[in-house]
Image (cartoon, grey):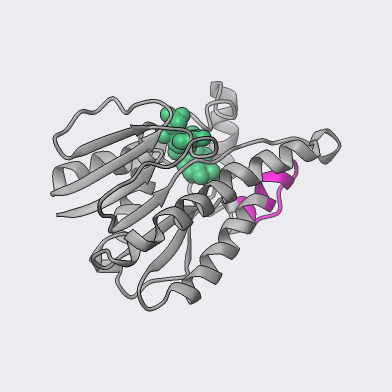
Amino acid sequence: MKTVLIIGASKGIGNALLANLLPNNTKVINLSRTLPKQNHENLVNFQCDILKDDLPNIDAIDSLVYCPGSINLKPISRLSLDEFRQDFEINVLGAVKAIKHYLPLIKNGNNPSILLFSTVAAKLGMPFHASIATAKSGVEGLVKSLGAELAPTIRINAIAPTVTKTDLSSKILRNEKMIENITQRHPLKKILDPVEVADMATFLISDKAKSISGQIFEIDCGIVTFKI
Ligand SMILES: NC(=O)c1ccc[n+]([C@@H]2O[C@H](COP(=O)([O-])OP(=O)(O)OC[C@H]3O[C@@H](n4cnc5c(N)ncnc54)[C@H](OP(=O)(O)O)[C@@H]3O)[C@@H](O)[C@H]2O)c1
């Protein structure tokens, strides 16, 4: 049975990934500050803060998926250096901490892989995204560099979604008008469902993706790709 460690399976995209994996003969180890609603014989939870706590000992890992992130949209004049640091910490250093801690286990995994999350804002310049674009560009750099360093043993990729309906985006999707504005800005005229992103994640950590590493997969509803 494959073992997937998800940092952040309690909510959002990580939770949708958990729901994909549990019925499919996969053991899921979740590490998050609050617990997922699901209970399952193949689910093991560790309640911990990736930035503050010592990471738990685990027996085996085939894939590591790191979900914590941030959306902190402000003009540069109102973004403090501390906010840049916090965004870098949760998006990049939390992932680095998890990867460094569990790397010896992942190396011994079966077709081992790592999956991180970027954002369309790392490719598409948008006002007020300076801090998150900077942090997620760090995530993309990590994917490229570690992809080379860990080949041929461990594959590492990232998904760069556009706005996805989760707790994280609830502030920017807080009313019908904002939802409609964001929908209309996307050429495919939609907002992402976390299940769509989780389906891509499920593929990328599966054996079907065994020849894919070092890639950033945009799920952009056309916003980066098309000018209509
Ligand atoms: N949603 C979007 O619109 C969007 C767009 C572009 C990119 N992304 C990226 O996609 C990824 C997933 O986003 P999402 O929307 O699913 O986020 P989310 O709804 O906030 O879920 C994040 C998960 O990470 C856990 N987490 C957060 N901080 C943690 C910490 N300090 N220690 C341990 N666990 C922590 C959360 O659990 P607890 O709160 O229980 O700890 C939760 O399970 C993120 O990297 C995000 O930047 C999202």
Q: Provide residue 155's location: percent of width, then percent of height.
A: 38, 68
Does residue 224 show up?
yes
Q: Provide residue 221's location: percent of width, then percent of height.
A: 49, 50
Q: Provide residue 33's location: percent of width, then percent of height.
A: 43, 29
Does residue 161 show up?
no
Position of the N terminus, as image quadrant, is bottom left
Q: Residue 52, located in which quarter of the rendered image? A: top right
Direction from residue 211 to residue 27 in the image, left or right: left
Give the farthest residue toward the right.
Answer: 77
Q: Is 173 in front, or is 58?
A: 58
- The residue positioned 72% from the left and 37% from the top of the image is 83
Q: Is 64 in front, or is 77?
A: 64
Q: Is 186 in front, or is 209?
A: 209
Up-down relation of residue 163 to residue 161 (above or below) = above
Up-down relation of residue 10 to residue 13 (above or below) = above
- The residue positioned 34% from the left and 26% from the top of the image is 35
Q: Provide residue 192's location: percent of width, then percent of height.
A: 44, 42
Up-down relation of residue 212 to residue 109 (above or below) = below
Q: Residue 29, located in which quarter of the rendered image? A: top left
- The residue positioned 53% from the left and 50% from the top of the image is 187
Q: Residue 14, located in which quarter of the rendered image? A: top left
Q: Is residue 187 magenta?
A: no
Q: Which residues are magenta?
A: 121-134
Position of the C terminus, as image quadrant, is bottom right
Q: Is 176 in front, or is 24?
A: 24
Give the farthest residue toward the top.
Answer: 175
- The residue positioned 47% from the left and 58% from the top of the image is 158
Q: Is residue 133 magenta?
A: yes
